[in-house]
Image (tube, rainbow, N blue to C red):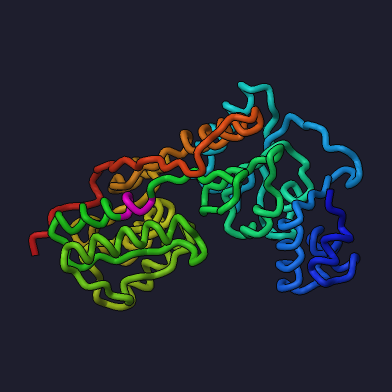
Amino acid sequence: MATIKDVAKKAGVAVSTASYALNGIEKVSAATVEKVLRAAEELNYQKNGFASDLKRTKTNTIALILSDMSGPYYSELIKGVQEVTASNGFDLIACSSVGGEKSTASKFLREKRVDGAIVLAQNISTEVIKASARKDFPIVVLDRSVDHPFVIHVEVNNRQGGYEATEYLINKGHQSVGYVSGPRNSHDNEERFQGYLTALKEHGLTYQSRLKISGDFTREGGYRATKMLVAQQDLPDAIFYANDEMAIGGLQAFTEKKVSIPEDVSVIGFDDIQLSEYVNPPLTTVKQPKYEAGALAVHLIFQMLAGEKVEQTYNLPTEFVERQSVILNKK
């Protein structure tokens, strides 16, 4: 079994430097951390969180690592993970990845403090995930694809959902469609955006960069992005918000600016959070199977812990939900 000395030698650094990099201590550069993690992965070096030289024991615990635990999107996801975890006699630890590589969540991965992990956190790097995963420590990622035999990818078909949302607006006669974007490093956001672009192209519409505004997946971000669109004084016929939270923030901004929805601008969201059917007007959106994604993710972990063969990628379909925030454009 490889030791930390072997890792340090392969990476060409001192043992202390390797230790700092593996433990997320902020004394080495990002380039050095990447080099050490790559060496650890190539040597299959594994560090135990409780005692590095002791044989790892089972904890009967699964970790769910989320970039944000406050949003309404996460409640159904957590419920799906929690119910399947409990039915298998395991405990669940849900933790935030705030702090990135130096967070407690990152330590759960690097030090194997649980028996498996589900990750939906863009600030936990793919390098850390690949360096942590092993046969007796499987990881399921919900926000990216990772090329590793013990990392499984469960994804909602965001691209198809983004395409259907945009095509729906176009079929309603809207010739200019804005896009309020999530974070730049979000895999889900990029997939939804690519679906949006494909729909525009297939219907002969030109993409306008001025109509793409970042809203960072928050209600406040959607509010600010919408105010920026209004300030341009040439609103699009319709706006596709990359999630419902931003759309709800957008509805508030439009109300303040005396812009009527859907009479002046049609609006569509993504996620189908519980609040989306109670806003005014009720929000047309794309529903994604949040509970099912969480339940499947933890079910796959139990299959891998049992030594059973699973696929590397699972893709779950979205469902279009038609409400009252979009009307036929008769201009």
Q: Does 278 appear above or below 43?
A: above
Give the residue drawn at x 25%, y 65%.
177
Give the residue drawn at x 45%, y 61%.
182
**Residue 320: horizontal and vertical position, in percent?**
28, 43
Dominant secondary structure (helix, strand or loop) of the stretch shown in magenta: helix
**Residue 128: horizontal and vertical position, in percent?**
68, 56
Tell which of 92 and 153 is nearer to you: 153
Tell which of 206 and 259 is nearer to you: 206
Taking the image as shown, residue 31 lies to the left or right of residue 303, namely right
Taking the image as shown, residue 209 lies to the left or right of residue 313, namely left
Q: Does 31 appear above or below 141?
A: below
**Residue 106: horizontal and vertical position, in percent?**
72, 53
| Extreme residue in the left direction | 330
Taking the image as shown, residue 284 lies to the left or right of residue 34, namely left
Give the residue drawn at x 76%, y 65%.
36
Q: Quadrant of the C terminus?
A: bottom left
Span shown in magenta: 158-162
Q: Quadrant of residue 214?
A: bottom left
Q: Does 38 appear above or below 311?
A: below
